[in-house]
């Protein structure tokens, strides 16, 4: 499971050109799921996201976590995080999980973050066309992979 985490001042998602959801200060988390991913991967990443100290303290040092700044999370499913560009110019998404596997895990991740970790959460709509706007604060963007665990 891969995530791209972006520290934002605000973020908004427009779903199918109709429904708008937004957060203020917090994290935009794009999540890509592959067939080998499971609940252990999801929980590891969710807990790491909650505990990341990437918000500025009173001295301008990234020393505070999401809860300490009363921030929110926008969680968006994005299979293209598993794109392979090794051959040719058209990315291959063969490593991305099929919806039968990825959608339930994405929904469980949202529920876990909200119910078990107590995070304020807004989710995209799995499989829908989404337009995302954000103000990346810093900019701060962090890539994590549950199989690499750096």
Image: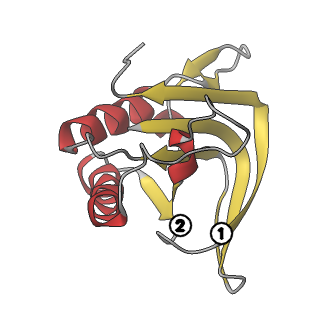
Measured as percent of width and height from the top left, residue 102 is found at 34, 57
- Circles 2, 1 touching at the beta carbon (< 8 Å): yes
Question: Relative to residue 148, is residue 111 depicted above or below?
Answer: below
Q: Are there few (<14), some (14-19), or many (20+) residues within 10 Å of tag 1?
A: many
Residue 88 position by quadrant: top right
How many numbered discs sit on the rendered protein? 2
Left or right, residue 13 beside residue 110 = right
Which residue has dot 1 on it? 130
* Image-based side of 28 in relation to 126, left or right: right
Name the element at disc 2: loop
Depth check: 5 or 78 in front? 78
Q: Do we see residue 120 in this rendering?
A: yes
**Observer-nearest of 105 and 136:** 105
Residue that mark 2 sits on = 124
Q: Residue furthest front?
A: 88
Residue 4 on image: x %, y %: 57, 37
Q: Quadrant of the N terminus?
A: top left
* Residue at position x 29%, y 41% in the image: 42
Does label 2 or label 1 sit earlier along the sequence? 2
Q: Residues within 10 Å of mark 2 (few under 14, many from 20)?
A: many
Kindly report which numbered mark, 2 or 1, lies closer to the viewer in this rendering: 1
Residue at coordinates 65% horizontally, 81% vertically from top-left?
Answer: 16
Residue 81: quadrant of the picture: top right
- Between 100 and 121, the one lying in front of the other is 100
Q: Is residue 20 left or right of residue 107?
A: right
Q: Dot 1: what SS?
A: strand
**Which of 57 and 88 lies nearest the eye of the viewer?**
88
Check the image and report above or below for 38 versus 12: above
How far apart are the alpha carbons under marks 2 and 1? 8 Å
């Amino acid at each position: 499971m891969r995530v791209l985490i972006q520290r934002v001042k605000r973020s908004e998602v427009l779903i199918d050109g109709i429904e708008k959801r937004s957060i203020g200060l917090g994290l935009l988390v794009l999540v890509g799921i592959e067939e080998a991913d499971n609940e252990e991967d999801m929980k590891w990443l969710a807990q790491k996201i909650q505990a990341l100290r990437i918000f500025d303290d009173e001295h301008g040092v990234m020393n505070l976590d999401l809860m300490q700044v009363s921030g929110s999370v926008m969680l968006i499913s994005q299979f293209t995080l598993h794109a392979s560009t090794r051959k040719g110019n058209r990315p291959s998404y063969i490593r991305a999980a099929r919806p039968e596997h990825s959608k339930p895990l994405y929904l469980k991740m949202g529920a876990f973050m909200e119910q078990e970790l107590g995070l304020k959460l807004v989710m995209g709509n799995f499989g829908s066309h989404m337009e995302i706007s954000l103000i990346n604060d810093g900019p701060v963007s962090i890539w994590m992979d549950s199989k690499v665990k750096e």
